[in-house]
Image (cartoon, grey):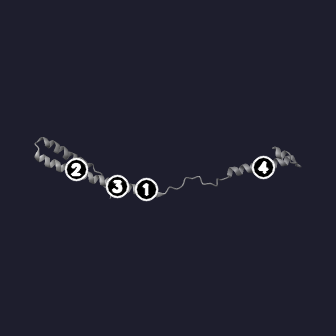
Amino acid sequence: MDRGRKAMPVQNKACMEKYLKRCQERHIQKLRDMKCSIDNNSPKQATHLKNKVKKNALMEERILQVETENRLLLEKMSHIMRVSASVFSLTSLDILYTMIDFKLKITHNAPLKKG
C-alpha cells in the first residue's frame, strides 16, 4: 500500500487490501479498454486537388501550340528546300532527301490525339 492509505484507519486490513486490489484491477482494465476521443486518421483527399484539371488543360494547350509551330516551321523548311533544290545542282539533292526523311520521321512519331 502507498503512504496515504497506510495512515487510514480500517477495521479489517485483509478486506481493505482485497478491495483496493480489485479497484486497481478495475482501473487498469478501464485504461486498457479506453478508446481515444481524437480522430487520428488522415483527412479525406479532395478530388479536385488530385485531378489538377487546369494544369492538364494548360499543358494540352501548350502541346497543341508547339505542334502547330513545329508544323509551320517544317512547311517553311520544306518550301525553302524545294525552291533551293531547283536553283542548286545535284549536291543539294542530298539536303532535300535529308529534309524529306526528317519530315517523315516527325509526322510518323507525332503522338495521336485523344478523342
Quarter containing the C terminus: bottom left
Select label 4 or label 2 by which is in front. Answer: 2
Q: Give the residue pinned by disc 1.
A: 51
Left or right: residue 59 compared with residue 3: left
On the image, the x and y values in percent for residue 43 come to 54, 55
Select label 4 or label 1 by which is in front. Answer: 1
On the image, the x and y values in percent for residue 67 come to 28, 52
Q: Residues within 10 Å of mark 1 (few under 14, many from 20)?
A: few
Alpha carbon distance from label 3 to label 4: 72 Å
Q: Give the residue pinned by disc 3.
A: 60
Count of all numbered marks drawn on residues in the image: 4
The three-letter code of the residue at mark 1 reads Asn
Alpha carbon distance from label 4 to label 1: 58 Å
5 in relation to 57, above or below = above
Which badge, 2 or 1, is on the more N-terminal residue? 1
> Label 2's element?
helix
Residue at coordinates 14% horizontally, 47% vertically from top-left? 84
Residue 50 location, quadrant: bottom left
Quarter containing the N terminus: top right
> Label 4's element?
helix
Q: Is residue 1 visible?
A: no
Q: Give the residue pinned by disc 2.
A: 74
The three-letter code of the residue at mark 2 reads Leu
Q: Give the residue pinned by disc 4.
A: 22
